[in-house]
Image (spheres, rainbow, N blue to C red):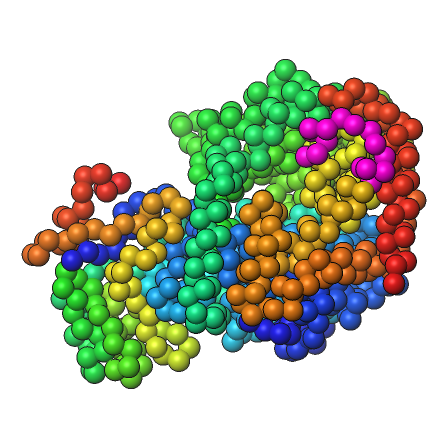
């Protein structure tokens, strides 16, 4: 299975085009919050950017706390989401150790599903879909070229 | 998509905000058009710029956030520079923050009893006292503001002023997200007059868009055009500083207060030199993949034992001209240091550089001395300019306070008006000849971007009066529509009328899409009518003698042609506002 990795986030220019692509194409709205990948500056623009997105845990703590099965474990890491089954309890967002689950005003979670639709919109190839062989973690699956 | 405008009107006197619905989408579109509409409703044309009720307007357009490079905000106000209506444009994250705050415009009226800052969002209005921020420079204030308002980090815009704005200088800009600026014509002073140190805009909501595939497909098509047209290279690679060498070789780069138009030392401040020696990285406005913002660095040893500090300063062609060639400073790190000093106090770098260039020549001619400038100024003396920038921004004495209101204001008192490089406001960096001089003198924003004159004159030498005035009048119309969307003007090659029409159409703005030509003309006239209503008289603007002595690649300026060009352009503008 492939997972999204911001392998070259050091190149990020903060254009937010990835977030806008995700919200437009996956979540069907226009926003930089309702998106599976969100770009933040830390301490102002002078310190660079960080991408907040699902790091493809396996097992995923957000799945374990989901009471209705709306979040289920995705093979290779991360989650599959059934929006209809979500009761907006917010447990997933609370359980995520890296704040990758964003709850909108209504409490609906938005999380990366590792579809990779944002990748081609990044003007500096900061993002890529990385093949993670069974039994291996994301970090050890990165090619030498992908490493910073 | 809204068939009306949704605006937040803040009254600082009462500490309250209200949400208003404003009709007129099909007439004025947004951005420039919307700002003029709002000024017509709330502006006091016959009262001074610092009257508490004068509005400070931030407006975006119908395409903001929905398409790439629709990333600018129009800031409109009655300017302290000429006490007339004007606009200043900036990007950063301001435009998307406003869009995601659910607003087409933010209008600030009233005057706070004491220093304050305002934070808004789709579910937020907060007015906080900010006496502790008063007197603080732009960068320090940014740090404190980020710690005061933690919500929406990275998804918000922080607009703030430095000491120049607090001192109500007509050269005070509004800093947008550290590296961008509503720089020209004194927006910073308008905030200062309102006791408003900062505005924080949280982009914390979501916009709907059409469910059809059509929209996503069109976005992708426009995005690919942006990536493929070479725009990435032109603006991301060397960026606008690429112009330094080309203008210098065209004898069109102002040096030492426009006493020369080329110099062998240009290479030391060229785009190539900056990229090689001083470029730290590029960043982008939100919603734009180009990344034209070039952030340079300066490392400074401040103590023995290898104790260093570093500064990050965004550079572009215009600030390099103003803090570099215009001041005779030909070292990229020195230029960045001067720019940094101006940025910190919240001065517009172009205006401040041109003003200090005049002060230097006035010093050389003995019109002013150390009593006025506090430190001896000399072309090429970067350390003196760093200090002078601080004195200017903090209005350190009567001389600097007056100079900060405009070079001609200081020249009126001290003499030297003939060598003040002012074309409606302090000149932009194009000594290309008569066409540009007339264009900036009478342009709506007195900006080189009011029309393509600065660019046209780098390629064409003809002196055909009627043809050139037609060019100035006609070229403004599509630009006005772009600034009503509000597009970055770097994207004007991609957003041709047929593309803009498609974009508006797919979002459901059928009426606008079908009437672009008429709407553009209407907005252009509305803007000018608004400016004239606040006292604009094109005949009262004079072009200082220095410009008549310029020699560019076209040869010496033809004084009679320049006078005729300006006079004819003035006639056409007056006729424009008299049209029904």
In this rendering, position of residue B356 left or right of residue B539: left
Residue B526 in view of the camera: yes
- Identify which residue is drawn at 55% across, 60% down: B503
Q: Position of residue B174 (x, y in %)?
A: 64, 52
Residue A107 sits above or below residue B310 on the image = below
User: Could you tell whether B194 is left or right of B463 in the image?
Assistant: left
- Dividing the image into 4 quarters, which one contains the N terminus of chain B? bottom right
- Percent x, y for residue B60? 61, 62
* Residue that extends furthest to the left in the rendered view of this protein: A135
Residue B427 vertical placement versus B552 (above, below): below
Q: What stretch is highlighted in magenta?
A: B455-469
Quick check: is B84 in the magenta stretch? no
| Image point (21%, 68%), residue name | A79
Can residue B56 be seen at all in this image of the molecule? no
Classify B122 as above or below B493. below
The front one of B495 and B42 is B495
Q: Residue at (90%, 33%) from the top-left corner? A: B563
In percent of width and height, residue B343 lies at 61, 43
Q: Image quadrant of residue B562? A: top right
Residue B306: percent from left, percent from top: 40, 28
Please name whichever residue, B391 or B295, is drawn nearer the observer in this view of the structure. Answer: B295
Which residue is painted at 54% across and 28% down in the image?
B271
Quadrant of residue A64 within the rendered picture: bottom left
């Amino acid at each position: 299975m492939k997972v999204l990795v911001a392998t070259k986030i050091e190149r990020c220019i903060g254009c937010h085009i990835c977030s806008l692509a995700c919200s437009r194409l996956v979540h069907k709205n226009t926003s930089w919050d309702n998106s599976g990948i969100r770009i933040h500056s830390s301490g102002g623009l002078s310190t660079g950017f960080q991408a907040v997105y699902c790091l493809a845990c396996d097992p995923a703590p957000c799945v374990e706390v989901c009471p209705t099965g709306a979040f289920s474990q995705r093979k290779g890491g991360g989650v599959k989401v059934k929006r209809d089954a979500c009761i907006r309890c917010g447990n997933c967002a609370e359980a995520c150790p890296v704040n990758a689950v964003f709850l909108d005003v209504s409490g609906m979670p938005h999380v990366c599903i590792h579809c990779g639709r944002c990748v081609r919109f990044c003007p500096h190839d900061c993002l890529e879909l990385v093949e993670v062989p069974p039994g291996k973690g994301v970090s050890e699956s990165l090619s030498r070229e992908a490493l910073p | 998509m809204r068939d009306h405008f949704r605006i937040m009107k803040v009254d600082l006197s009462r500490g309250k905000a209200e949400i208003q619905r404003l009709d007129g989408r099909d007439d004025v579109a947004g951005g420039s058009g919307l700002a003029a509409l709002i000024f017509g409703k709330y502006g006091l044309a016959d009262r001074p710029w610092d009257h508490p009720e004068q509005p400070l307007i931030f407006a975006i357009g119908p395409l903001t956030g929905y398409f790439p490079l629709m990333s600018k905000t129009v800031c409109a106000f009655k300017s302290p520079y000429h006490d007339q209506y004007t606009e200043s444009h900036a990007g950063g994250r301001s435009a998307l923050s406003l869009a995601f705050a659910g607003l087409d415009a933010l209008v600030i009226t009233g005057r706070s009893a004491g220093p304050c800052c305002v934070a808004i969002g789709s579910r937020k209005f907060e007015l906080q006292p900010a006496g502790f921020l008063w007197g603080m420079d732009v960068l320090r204030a940014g740090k404190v503001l980020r710690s005061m308002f933690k919500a929406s980090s990275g998804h918000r815009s922080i607009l703030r002023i430095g000491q120049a704005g607090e001192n109500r200088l007509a050269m005070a800009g509004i800093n947008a997200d550290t590296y961008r600026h509503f720089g020209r014509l004194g927006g910073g002073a308008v905030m200062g007059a309102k006791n408003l140190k900062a505005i924080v805009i949280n982009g914390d909501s979501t916009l709907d868009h059409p469910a059809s595939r059509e929209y996503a497909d069109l976005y992708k098509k426009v995005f690919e055009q942006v990536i493929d047209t070479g725009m990435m290279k032109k603006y991301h690679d060397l960026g606008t500083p690429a112009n330094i060498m080309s203008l210098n070789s065209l004898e069109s780069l102002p040096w030492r207060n426009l006493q020369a138009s080329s110099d062998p030392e240009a290479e030391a401040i060229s785009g190539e030199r900056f990229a090689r020696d001083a470029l730290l990285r590029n960043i982008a406005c939100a919603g734009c993949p180009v990344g034209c913002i070039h952030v340079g660095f300066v490392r400074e040893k401040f103590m023995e034992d290898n104790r260093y500090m570093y500064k990050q300063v965004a550079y572009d062609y215009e600030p390099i001209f103003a803090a570099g060639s215009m001041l005779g400073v030909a070292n990229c790190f020195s230029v960045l240091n001067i720019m940094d000093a101006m940025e910190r106090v919240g001065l517009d770098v172009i205006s401040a550089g041109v003003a200090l260039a005049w002060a230097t020549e006035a010093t050389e001619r003995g019109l002013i001395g150390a009593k006025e400038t506090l430190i001896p100024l000399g072309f090429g003396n970067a350390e003196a300019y760093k200090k002078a920038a601080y004195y200017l921004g903090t209005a350190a004495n009567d001389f600097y306070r007056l100079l900060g209101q405009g070079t001609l204001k200081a020249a009126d008192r001290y003499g030297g008006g003939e060598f003040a490089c002012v074309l409606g406001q302090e000149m932009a960096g194009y000594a290309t000849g008569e066409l540009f001089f007339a264009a900036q003198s009478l342009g709506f924003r007195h900006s080189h971007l009011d029309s393509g004159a600065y660019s046209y004159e780098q390629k064409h030498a003809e002196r055909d009066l009627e043809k050139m005035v037609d060019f100035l009048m006609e070229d403004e119309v599509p630009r006005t529509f772009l600034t009503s969307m509000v597009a970055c003007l770097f994207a004007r090659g991609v957003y041709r009328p047929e593309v803009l029409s498609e974009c508006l159409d797919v979002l459901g703005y059928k009426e606008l899409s079908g009437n672009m030509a008429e709407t553009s003309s209407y907005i252009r006239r509305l803007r000018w009518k608004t400016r004239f209503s606040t006292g604009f008289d094109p005949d009262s603007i004079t072009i200082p003698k220095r410009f008549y002595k310029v020699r560019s690649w076209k040869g010496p300026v033809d004084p009679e042609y320049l006078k005729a060009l300006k006079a004819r352009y003035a006639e056409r503008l007056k006729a424009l506002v008299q049209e029904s």
